[in-house]
Image (cartoon, grey):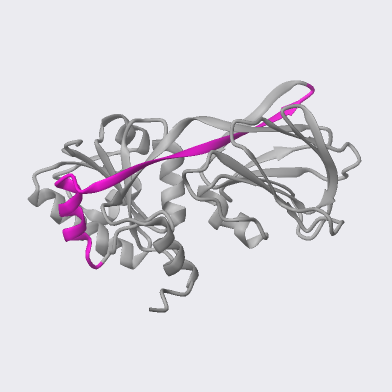
Amino acid sequence: MTTFRTIGLIGKPDHPGANTSLKGILRYLKKRQCRILLEKNVAWKMDDDEVDITDLVSIGEQADLAIVVGGDGSMLGAARVLSRFNVAVVGVNRGNLGFLTDLDPDEFEPQLDAIFNGEYQIEQRFLIEAEVHRHGLLQSHNCAVNETVLHPGKVAQMMEFEVYVNDAFVYSQRSDGLIIATPTGSTAYSLSGGGPILTPNLDALVMVPMYPHTLSSRPIVIDANSEIRLKISSQNRDNLQVSCDGHEALSALPGDEVIIRKYAHKLSLLHPKNYSYFNVLRNKLRWGSKLY
């Protein structure tokens, strides 16, 4: 059991509900006499001189536990940085669905009490990284918790590309793009595109075509240790984009190659003791409960 003494507090300060939760958690952590590292984007809303104000990298380097207050978007942004460090991350849900943020904003005190008493589960979630190569040279790269998406820069415009997995040719395609999602991201954009739900323990990736110009194109699940290479046709007329979690966008040109592989670091996601992934799916996706 890890003893959590130095706590990073991260959130979405522009959201009124998140702001209320952040202030409540700050008071709670002070009562526990924790050392508090307040993320600088949150600090100006807190107006507190008794805590250390720092950035995400410093929180990753120093904290035993990082608490993220917000929705999945807030968690994704923090996770892309914190995954590089050996720090546990837990989320307080102040968003919409909240697949990655487990704690109830109205009942966080007993839930945090349990976590500080060692009553929790910890789960390793892998990330992926995307690289854009031009004439054999690396142009840009970034990592993603949920998914990497190759898509045109314009809405409703088709593009042409080839897909290779471990240098084996898979197919050429005309479509609006391709989603490569992790199990964590299988309930996000990939799900909206008709992809399957992958349980988080699977070491797999799913490739989901976006509006392909053929009825036979279907999502494919592959080994997560594969290297995926997308060769963008030089026949495309416009610049393209490679997005990571819908936030970070890498520019790509016709003729470029995009390489997606498993990231070297993992996210240590902390859950309450009674956490069940299938319970999360039932609640968030409004599946039916037991009949009897």
Picture quadrant where residue 84 is located = top left
Quadrant location of the N terminus in the rendered image: top left
Q: Nearer the viewer, residue 172 or 138?
A: 172
Q: Nearer the viewer, residue 23 or 41?
A: 23
At which x and y percent is residue 192?
63, 62
Residue positioned 91% across, 41% down in the render: 235
Residue farthest toward the top in the current orientation of the protein:
136
Q: How many marks?
A: 0
Q: Nearer the viewer, residue 204 or 33?
A: 204
At which x and y percent is residue 153?
74, 50
At which x and y percent is residue 183?
53, 47
Residue positioned 79% across, 60% down in the render: 156
Q: Is residue 39 left or right of residue 214?
A: left
At which x and y percent is residue 40?
32, 44
Q: Tell me if residue 123 is in the magenta stretch.
A: yes
Q: Tell me if residue 137 is in the magenta stretch.
A: no
- Range shown magenta: 106-135
Q: Is residue 194 left or right of residue 215?
A: left
Q: Is residue 22 above or below residue 183?
A: below
Residue farthest toward the front in the current orientation of the protein:
292
Residue positioned 20% across, 53% down in the render: 112
Q: Is residue 21 above or below residue 66?
A: below
Residue farthest toward the right in the current orientation of the protein:
235
Quadrant location of the C terminus in the rendered image: bottom left
Q: Nearer the viewer, residue 116 or 53?
A: 116
Q: Is residue 256 left or right of residue 13?
A: right
